[in-house]
Structures are given as structure tokens and as C-alpha cells.
Amino acid sequence: MLNAGLQLRRPLESEIGAYRRFLIANRALGHSNISELLKENQAGPKKHPALARALEQQICLKLGISYLEPRSPFSVSRTRNCAACARSGYHSYLFDLTWIEKCPVHQLDLVHRCPDCNQPWPHPYEFYDRRCKCCGLGAKFSVLARRKALEPPDMWQALVEMDAVIHNHLERQDLVLLRGSHATEYDTTEIKSAAVTDRFWPVVCVPRTPGWERLCDSFGVQLSPIIERRFRLKKPPPGSSRRHPKKT
Ligand SMILES: [Zn+2]
Ligand SMILES: [Zn+2]
């Protein structure tokens, strides 16, 4: 009988985090048994994360528990994680945004490599080959569930708040002239439109309030000042492609 690992579920999981949780919860079955079970659904290994999600959805429906859809990443840049989150079987999609530097729960820097085995965080098909307790299938489910129990649910509140801010401001694309701040990354005369994957998105797209500054601080986000804001990008007419003005 497959287990969805709902005891380990926390808000704002990434797709890879949700799949890893599923494998951790069923680690006693072994790789070949899980592969066999998922193969019954006539799909290759690449489809396994999606099948694990479908199974979780069915289990939630049966138990009357709300199903939380894991978040797909904004970009396919290399995954980063917090070591303590990794050890407790968690990864948030927020950790892949380049301007987020710290895990707000554990106040640890987000890193590209597992600090225990020094390998990059694994792809979904690599979990079974990792013997590492931090980035592989980790400790036993019961041990992980106990670790999770040490963290009260309100510890994840900052992630929920950050997700809400991002989705409330996602449509906003201000064009800004950057001068002084971020000078090493952006030419001082360059005009850019801000997308959520850009480092300066939190500075230009969210109004600066004490609440936002506090939230940014808990994620290690640098809010450098914007010296000059030029104009706001208008929505392009449907079908037209947008070009950024060229530097002169
Ligand atoms: Zn963490
Ligand atoms: Zn490792």
C-alpha cells in the first residue's frame, strides 16, 4: 500500500520536494517495487513525479484532506536548498528564486550543494542512488516525522506570506532606470523590465513597507535603493512582441 507522506507535507513545496517526500514515505518498498507500481500506470520514470502527485490527490480526496498542488519553478536554474529543510525532507519552490538568500524557518543560507556529501542537489531520478541522509531518501519516515513535529506550523508562515506577495505583484512589470544600485549587474543607463526571476524584482515591483522589509529580511533579501524610476510598462497589444529600448 503506497503512502502519500502527508505527515511530512508543508506549504509551498516544489514539485521535486513533493516527489522526494513521496519516495521517503515509501522507502521501505524499495526502488524496484515503487517503479513497478508506478509502471502499472504505463509511464516511464520521467512521469513518476506526476503520478505520485495524482496518487496523493486520490488519497487526500479519500481522507477528506485538502490537496496542495506543488509549485512548479519559475526558472529551471539549478536547485538550491537549506540544509535543515533538506534533512527534514522539504524543498520550497521559493528557494529557486535568485533574490532569496536564506531559509526563513532555519535562518540558514540557501546552497547549491548538499553540505554533507558536497554533490549538487539531486534530480528526481537520482534520489535512490544517493546514500546521503541529507539529500537522498534520508532518515526513516518516523524519524523525519518526529523532526517535523518539532517545528510548529506557524514557522512556515513566512513562506506563505512571501508566496502571497509574489502572486499579488506578478503582473506588475515596471520599467526602471537603475543607477547606483546593482551597478555590477546592470549598466547604469540600462532600462529593464522587472520579472520575478530578476534580482531586483523585490526592490522595484513591491511597494516598500515595514512589513515587506521585515519579510525580506527573514529571507536574506537585499533591498537596495532604486535611484530613479522612469515609467511603467504598458501591456502590449495582443499578438505584438515587446522589445526593450536599446542603449544609446
Ligand atoms: Zn530551512
Ligand atoms: Zn548529500
Image (cartoon, rainbow, N blue to C red):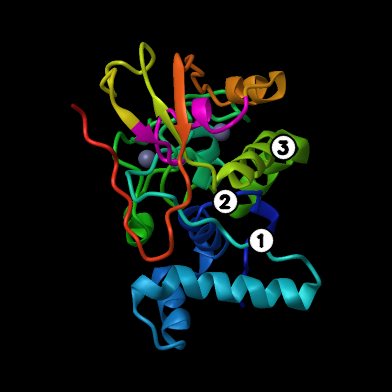
Which residue has dot 1 on it?
A: 68
For numbered disc 2, what is the local secondary structure?
loop
Asked whether, in this view, residue 165 is left or right of residue 24, the answer is right
Which quadrant would residue 45 be assigned to in this image?
Answer: bottom left
Q: Which mark sits nearer the N-terminus, 3 or 2? A: 2
> What number is the disc on residue 157?
3
Q: Give the range drawn in magenta.
A: 192-207
Of residue 78 and residue 136, the one placed in the foreground of this image is: 78
For numbered disc 3, what is the local secondary structure?
helix
- Verify whether residue 67 appears in magenta: no
For numbered disc 1, what is the local secondary structure?
loop
Q: Which amino acid does label 2 sit on?
A: Glu
Identify which residue is drawn at 35% across, 33% down: 192
Mark 2 crowdedness (10 Å alpha carbons): few <14, some 14-19, many ≥20: many
Q: What residue type is labelled 1?
A: Leu
> What number is the disc on residue 127?
none
Which quadrant would residue 110 be assigned to in this image?
Answer: top left
Label pair 2/1, CB-CB below 8 angstroms: yes
Asked whether, in this view, residue 176 is left or right of residue 147, the answer is left
Identify which residue is drawn at 62% across, 69% down: 3
Q: How far apart are marks 1 and 3 (CA)?
A: 15 Å
Which residue has dot 2 on it?
A: 13
Q: How far apart are marks 2 and 1 (CA)?
A: 9 Å
